[in-house]
Image (cartoon, rainbow, N blue to C red):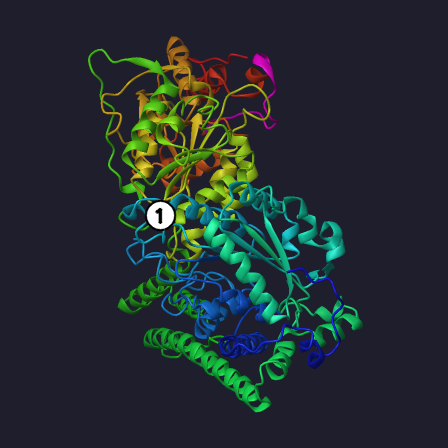
Amino acid sequence: MDHDGVSPRHGRRLAGSLTSVRDQDLASEAIADYRTACLSRSISHIGRREVSAGRAKFGIFGDGKETAQVALARQTQRGDWRAGYYRDQTFVLATGVATPRMLFAQLYGDANVAREPASGGRQMNNHFATRLLDPDGHWLSQTQRVNSAAGFGAVAVQMASALGLAYASKLYRGATPALRAGFSNDGNEVVFASIGNGSAAEGIFFESVNAATVLQVPLVICVWDDEFAISVPNALQMAHGSVSRALSGMRASETATGLRISSARGWDYPALRQTMKAATDAARSVHVPALIHVTELTQPLGHSTSGSHERYKASERLVWEAEHDCLRVMRGWLIDECGFAVAVLEEIEESARQEAQAQCEAAWTDYATELRLEGERARDEIVRCLPDATVAFDDPISRRSIDMALHQAVVAMRGVPGPERRRLAGFAQEYRDQSEQRYRSSLYSESADNPIRVSGVAPTYTSSPEWIDGRQILLRFFDGKLSEEQRLFILGQDVAQLGDVNLAFEGLALKHGPLRVIDTGIREATILGQGIGAAMRGLRPIVDIQYLDYLLFALEVASDDLSTLLYRTAGGQKAPVIIRTKGHRLLGMTHSGSPMAVLLHACRGMYLCTPRDMTRAAGMYATLLDGDNPAVVVEVLNGYRIKEPVPANLSQMRVPLGIPETLRPGSDVTVVTYGAMCRIALEAAAALSDLGVDIEVIDIQTLNPFDIHHRITESVARTGAIVVADEDVPGGASAFLMREILEVQGAFQHLDAAPRTVTAAANRPAYGTDGDFFTKPGALDIVSVVYDVMGERAPAQFPPLY
């Protein structure tokens, strides 16, 4: 429903412009919604007070959006999803995703998951999530409640996974009952995505809306538009100053599918109900995506507790906002159009304030009591060992202050003999360990299904194995897996009709169907988003990113969403997505980079697999599909046409994660490498042998997890020297590897020569054979560095080459 008129200036007269209501059911629902809206507003007021009082660090709330969100909540059904941002406070209250007590627990940073189930104190307030997993990491049913994907502060990134959550409904529609059990009601779920008008200017928002329009998925996007992005007005944010006008070219018509676009004013409760119902019904029944532009919203309390909107809003705007506060307008409408007495509304408002205050105090009591008890135990231990000690904690008390007091006591007792010092040191260490566990656990899967627990099954061969192209090894593997695992699907650019640019999926779309091997447009962020959302709903996607460099387009989604999902929900949500990509050596700057350190550091929480050939790649995919942790697999780009023997046990083979493989034993120098460099290192080994140098070549296989049994250090203990050969830039992945080997594993103590690295140049690889030779590490580079190591040991035997 489009509204283009000018609003009256006063709440009572505003109600006269609203749709007349005589329906008693609607009136009954409206008064219940008003109570929820008042409760939410009271939470916002009290939450700000808690920050000002020092009991909470920061607050951001949903004031001004209450009426629109209770209207939206009326459209939800069991099994539906929310993927929104930090203004959805009223929506989660109305749908039961969160309670007032939970909201306050998160405001205080309560690390108790039973009290703060969204994140266990890891996220700032108003970042909502329902727990999808039981304590053992197994799926809970998603069909009996409204579900919420975990929020995060990276604006607009929620749009990518929202697309995937909606895409799962498309895949589940018509699926077998066994496949959708616990995950879908025959694909009838709607995903409600929310975003602010400022964040809607982000590229990922436009990419997601475009993808939803192309895919025709049941995604209802609500843009909460209060006309500012913090201090920046719409005129500087969006074409035409309006997201709905900017997207008008995607609008569905009678002759073409597209995006259903509508708008409603944020204070107009009956119009919001009507607009949202029409959009949701269409999305649910025929999977048409919708965008609802909710305009004329206000922000009565400002952006957050960190700033005041009076600094950037004109006085006329502030007057307008006071007159158009959605609760004020809804109150007038309930009186004038629905016939409710002022006294009834006043009673509701006071009851909401009292409930919010009671829930605030209950949440604070839960949180503070636990901390005070911990502080008392720590004080008792300190005084037991240091009777004259004065122990003081912060007010309000914090685990930080408790830990610091324990540390100071341990320092004071350093060098003191006797059991008291040992007891205190043990208590302090145990307290530190427990506190760190609260805030560091669940970065990786801690369930029995973590793929690191999958046992390796080495390839076996007949006496005369068939030799085929490496890409055909993958083709046979994926063919078998698609037949074996009905939850598995593969999506990406050129994977279906073409069968992948390297033909690793040739013919599989025709054989297994268009919903199992799926072509997408060139839109890496939302390709990954499709995978994340589908994986959160129980499916097993392999997301194909055509080249490793192109993964940078999706890095925001991979880093801020997928990598942190398990961690930021304290083990409550997971998305075991496998990203398949190809990298290392090829001609040209864009297809031959190896930004491994970027992935290592930006994507902690995901495993990073670097197979040297396609047999090893197939084994890693099998291992990951047996597990539940997300991962990236980087195949060797120039290895698809290299012949490999076909394992007799291709479908049973598993490559264990975190277990290096020694490709060539040697006694002089340990050369550690991975991926495409393995073949080059073996070539260098042959040349070095002619020079009287015997190197051991180790393929680490997975950068993360890395050498969990410290086999590389065992090698260094024998050879006394280490060289890391890496296609990343200087100080890239090689720095990570050196830290793991020398510091974490303690190999430094075994060295009798300086550790060395062989890396690519700092610049991007140049084009052509010569460009590759002089910018990428080759066999001659390894020979030169290893020879220098030998010269450091025995200069007379190994005189300088240059």
Nearest the eye: 384 or 12 = 12
From this viewpoint, which residue is outermost toward the top?
690
Q: Which residue is mark 1?
A: 538
**In magenta segment, residue 760:** yes
Query: Where residue 280 appears, x then y in whole percent?
Result: 51, 57
How packed mark 1 is, by other alpha carbons closer than 10 Å (few <14, some 14-19, many 20 or more), is many
User: Is residue 757 left or right of 429 when viewed as pictured?
Assistant: right
Kind of residue indicated by mark 1 = Gly
* Res 346 → quadrant: bottom right
Residue drawn at x 71%, y 72% is 321
Number of numbered markers: 1
Question: Is residue 147 in view?
Answer: yes
> Can you say which quadrant of the picture contains the N terminus?
bottom right
What secondary structure do most residues of the magenta stretch adopt? loop
Q: Quadrant of residue 328?
A: bottom right
Residue 674 coordinates in the image, percent (x, y)? 41, 27
User: Is residue 474 found left or right of 545 in the rendered image?
Assistant: left
* Part of the protein shown in magenta: 756-770
Which sits in the foreground, 185 or 429? Answer: 185
| Quadrant, the C terminus | top right
Tell me: 769 left or right of 246.
left
